[in-house]
Amino acid sequence: MYSNGYIFRYAGILVIVVAAVLSTTALVLKPFQDKNDAVDKMQSILVAAGFEGVTAQNAIELFNKNVSNMMVIDPEGNVVDDFTGEGKEKSKAFGLNLKEELYKKSVQKPFELPLYVVQKEGQKIYIVPMRGVGLWGPIWGNMALKDDFKTVVGVTFGHKSETPGLGAEIATPIFTTQFPGKTIFDSNDKFVSVSVVKGGIANQPAEKQPHMVDAISGGTITSNGVSEMLKNVLESYEPFIKKQS
Amino acid sequence: MSAVKQEKEPLFSSKNVKLLTSPLNMSNPITVQVLGICSALAVTAKMKPAFVMAISVIAVTALANFIISLMRNGIPPRIRIIVQLVVIALLVIVVDQFLKAFVYDVSKQLSVFVGLIITNCILMGRLEAFAMSNKPWPSLLDGLGNGFGYGMILLLVGFVRELFGSGTVWGFHVIPQSFYELGYKNNGFMILPPMALILIGIIIWIQRARNPQLIED
């Protein structure tokens, strides 16, 4: 028979040992994981801009070849930092923590946002990185806009732990191929974002259809999260976009 | 010292070898014990994620069995389940971290299912039924055996689903282009989880047809 004291000591020591093992593993593997994350971010940006055949192996090379500017802008639409040199993964824009910046936005503090410029077939494509919340955890993505800052060229989404087969479908082509050609400003140049709607966009008024995509059945909360993320992030770029035209 | 000193058992005695091999067939965790079905349906659309999942489960079952068996005499029975869970969770998180560091793309495909190894019934089942009452070495073998039994079915299902669903094996195209030109199409149904359930059903059917002693009355 084990005494209560023994049980408490046993549980306490076990937990401390386990915690030590876990933190050591996390610390040792962190550099490898960070590199993977950076490469994944580059891949996602390039795929959003419409590049094909981007793999983990050639992502860094393609990224440095095709991305011309790594800009940081503020909510008033001023360019704070514009990096054009080599080694773009070390630029301020690439290192900006979107989660923290969007948190600062939500508590009305000054914040900064990254904007990447990709050169593709002689055209400038602007990439807006995004971050928001899904059902179980964070969701993120990149939206590529034409140089009119209005038309969507492509989009990629990622997520930490959305339900496979339901919410996780936002990362699949079934969902993302709906976005190219959509517009984030209406015909009066008013910001409308792109919303994810239930019930089929074909049933919506025709003038709204260029700003809508179909939601995922069974993934309502994730779909709403995508809508919310697009609106929240893109609206912060509106002053910058207004200044360009 | 006890007078009747037990004769030291060889490492691979027939009893120990049986621990390793019987889960491959007569006590297969998936087809006979019907454990771990959820992940078997989810990660078998392609062989590569199925293989990584199998390796992960083998590592976790073997190590969890081994560690729990080493600890078995000190674990207070009243908190034994939570102790087992802590050990399993520790191993699963370590495996997940390794996958994220070294096979990032596969870890993205496996997404939540690596975390769900924690709830894989094979693990708790083997810890309770075997590791708590056996020595470390047989426990390690039992863990390995059950992991292999699980992995074998996963790869088999993954092979069939990838071959007919995508026309590839391990990512390489094996169905010649001329077949497609003649009108052959990949079976989209194979990609969906229900087909994995049907395939596992067929495997169970074949296995029971060949081994009448597995058939319940």
Image (spheres, grey):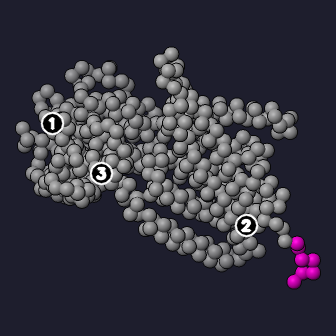
**Chain letter of disc 2?**
B
Asked if disc 3 and disc 2 are in contact, CB closer than 8 Å, the reply is: no
Q: Nearer the viewer, mark 1 or mark 2?
A: 1
Would you name the residue on which mark 2 appears? B136
- Kindly tell me whether residue B93 is visible in this rendering: no
In which quadrant of the rendered image does the N terminus of chain A lie? bottom right
Distance between the Cα atoms at labels 1 and 2?
66 Å
Horizontal and vertical percent for residue A133? 36, 47
Q: Do marks 1 and 2 both belong to one polypeptide chain?
A: no
Magenta segment's dominant SS is loop
Label 3: element kind: helix
Q: Which mark is residue B122?
A: none
Mark 1 vs 3, N-terminal side: 3
Q: Which residue is more in the foreground, A243 or B70?
A: B70
- Kindly tell me whether residue A201 is visible in this rendering: yes
Would you name the residue on which mark 1 appears? A122
